[in-house]
């Protein structure tokens, strides 16, 4: 699939983000990691600090949208995080819904034929193109270019 996203794809991405958010907000409240900073989570779980920093995006009070998919770890990072929690003794039953949400994310990426990186790029382009603040700047540039060509 190209880097241009349809409204249907954006809507599907919103659903994926909402499901991930719903499940991982609960995970981030589990006793071993609740209230920990990224560096503390890194030490406890023995995973990358960047993954831990990105996991903290689930603590946001903002309503989840597809933009969340550009801020959180990818499928492998989410799975690594859940595996680390299992190593720390978190029961599979507690993590099952989060595992399912990660599978849903992976399935979504497969269906649209994109990696998370290419999805992030496409979403960023989409938001930039549809953001009213950016529209005015683009119009100004277009006007200036037309003025310089036409005199």
Image: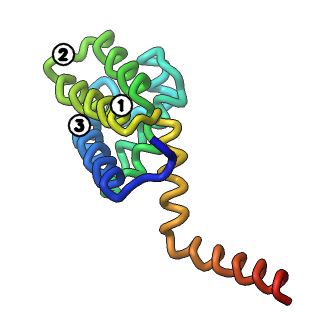
The residue at the point 82 percent across, 87 percent down is: 150
Q: Where does label 3 land, which residue? A: 23
Q: Quadrant of residue 62?
A: bottom left
Residue 70 at x, y = what percent?
47, 44
The residue at the point 23 percent across, 37 percent down is: 23
Q: Quadrant of residue 133?
A: bottom right
Q: Quadrant of the C terminus?
A: bottom right
Q: Where does label 1 land, which residue? A: 110
Q: Is residue 96 left or right of residue 88?
A: left
Callout 2 secondary element:
helix
Q: Where does label 2 land, which residue? A: 92
Q: CA distance from mark 3 to mark 2?
A: 14 Å
Q: 73 or 93, which is in the foreground?
A: 73
Outermost residue to the bottom: 151
Q: How would you rate the neighbour count of disc 1 (Cα within 10 Å): few for under 14, some for 14-19, many for 20 or more? A: few
The residue at the point 47 percent across, 15 percent down is: 46
Callout 3 secondary element:
helix
Q: CA distance from mark 3 to mark 1?
A: 21 Å
> Considering only vertical position in the picture, is 20 above or below 124?
above
């Amino acid at each position: 699939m190209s880097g241009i996203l349809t409204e249907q794809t954006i809507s599907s991405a919103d659903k994926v983000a909402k499901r991930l958010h719903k499940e991982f907000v609960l995970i981030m409240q589990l006793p071993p990691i609740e209230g920990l900073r990224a560096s503390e989570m890194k030490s406890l779980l023995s995973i990358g600090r960047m993954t831990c920093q990105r996991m903290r995006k689930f603590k946001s009070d903002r309503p989840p949208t597809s933009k969340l998919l550009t801020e959180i770890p990818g499928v492998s990072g989410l799975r690594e995080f859940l595996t680390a929690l299992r190593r720390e003794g978190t029961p599979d039953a507690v993590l099952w819904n989060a595992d399912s949400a990660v599978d849903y994310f992976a399935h979504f990426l497969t269906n649209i034929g994109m990696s998370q990186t290419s999805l992030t790029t496409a979403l960023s382009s989409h938001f930039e193109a549809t953001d009213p603040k950016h529209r005015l700047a683009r119009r100004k540039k277009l006007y200036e270019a037309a003025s310089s060509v036409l005199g």
